[in-house]
Image (spheres, helix red, strand yellow):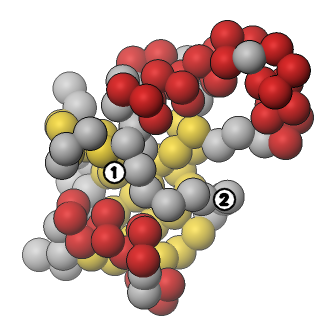
Amino acid sequence: MVGIYKIHQIVLDDDLVDLINREGWNCHVKAVAYSQASMKGDTKIGVMHDCYTHVADIIADDLDHVFEAGNIGPEDRITRHDRMHSISVGDIIEDSNGVKHVVAQFGFEQLA
């Protein structure tokens, strides 16, 4: 069923990227959260410390369609609210019922 899906990502601003480049991934809780989410699909630290930002809404049929639109378009299905990278491991997709799924290494896993 077609719906609006919210995309939540950990956004690293330029200052944090500079800090990561100087001091490594353990320099800030947001950097650790990003690393854990993108490498392992582990969202615990990022959710616990409110590191995720609602970056976009995507009109799609299901999670697979969200993933496709968030990576290859079409752009007219996406309403951006903040800087957004292509949808990848560790990102959270929220459906219109408020159910959240994390993009896993293979497929999606519902968050508790």
Real-space CA distance between mark 2 and mark 1, rounded to the nearest whole angstrom: 15 Å
Q: Secondary structure at mark 1?
A: strand
Disc ID at residue 82? 2
Question: In the rendered structure, which disc, 2 or 1, sits on the residue that comes first in sequence?
Answer: 2
The residue shown at (20%, 64%) is: 64
Q: Position of residue 41 (x, y in %)?
A: 35, 31
The residue shown at (21%, 61%) is: 63
Which residue is the extreme one toward the left? Answer: 1
Q: In this image, 5 relative to 111: left or right?
A: right
Mark 1: amino acid: Ile
Q: Is residue 109 visible?
A: yes
**Looking at the image, is 97 positioned above or below residue 106?**
below
Q: Position of residue 101 (x, y in %)?
A: 25, 43
The residue shown at (59%, 18%) is: 32
**Looking at the image, is 41 positioned above or below residue 89?**
above
Q: Position of residue 62 (x, y in %)?
A: 17, 67
Number of other residues with Cα within 10 Å of mark 2, as a class: few under 14, some 14 to 19, many 20 or more: few
Q: Which residue is mark 1?
A: 93
